[in-house]
Image (cartoon, rainbow, N blue to C red):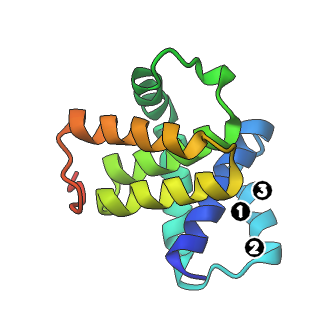
Amino acid sequence: MNRTEAREWIVKMLYQYDVSRLPISKIFENFYKENDPGEQKEYIENTVIGAIEHLEEIDKEIERYSQNWALNRMPKIDLAILRCSIYEMQYGNIPVNISINEAVEIAKKYSTEDSHVFINGLLGAFVRDKGLEEGKSNDN
């Protein structure tokens, strides 16, 4: 499994968590029954657990930049994509441009026709306001 595939699975797990509220251990168990994460296991688990641990903070950022979109009206898959990307940029060491590009591509693949534009705009505003440089990772 490569990093792009791992990121897609992170989004799927965050989506599953959001709609089912299953314990994260059960979500991992279900995933590992059918998938071998290989070298990506630590990245997947750290990102999913981290995004869930920081869910309240991440959701406040999404609300701040969503321009009058209530979280409960937003497609759940878009929320999962945004949560993954914001977690990576705010708390991880993933270069900003990679995280945004991957989020846009995942949105094109799994969400509505125009979601990638919304996601790109929201993440771009987040990066500008936070002073995160494109191509650089956040060293929190």
User: How far from the left and from the top, in percent, is residue 100?
Assistant: 41, 54
Looking at the rendered structure, the secondary structure element under dot 3 is helix
User: How far from the left and from the top, in percent, is residue 19?
Assistant: 77, 37
Q: Residue at x 61, y 82 (%)?
A: 1
Q: Amino acid at mark 1?
A: Phe
Residue that badge 1 annotates: 28
Residue furthest toward the front? 113
Tell me, yes or no, whether the two marked residues, 2 and 3, touch with CB atoms within 8 Å. Answer: no
Relative to 78, 33 lies left or right: right
How far apart marks 3 and 1 lie (CA) works out to 5 Å
Q: Residue at x 67, y 21 (%)?
A: 72
Please say whether residue 18 is visible from this viewpoint: yes
Tell me, yes or no, whether the two marked residues, 3 and 1, touch with CB atoms within 8 Å. Answer: yes
Q: Residue at x 51, y 36 (%)?
A: 118
Q: Amino acid at mark 3?
A: Lys
Residue that badge 3 annotates: 26
Question: Closest to the observer: 51 or 5?
Answer: 5
Residue 117 in the image: above or below residue 104? above
Please say whether residue 47 is visible from this viewpoint: no
- Which quadrant would residue 86 be assigned to in this image? top left
Question: Closest to the observer: 113 or 111?
Answer: 113
Relative to 83, 34 lies left or right: right
Earlier along the polypeptide chain: callout 2 or callout 3?
A: 3
Q: Which mark is residue 44?
A: none
Looking at the rendered structure, the secondary structure element under dot 1 is helix
Looking at the rendered structure, the secondary structure element under dot 2 is helix
Q: Residue at x 75, y 73 (%)?
A: 32
Relative to 74, 22 lies left or right: right
Q: Amino acid at mark 2?
A: Tyr
Residue that badge 2 annotates: 32
How far apart marks 1 and 2 lie (CA) works out to 6 Å
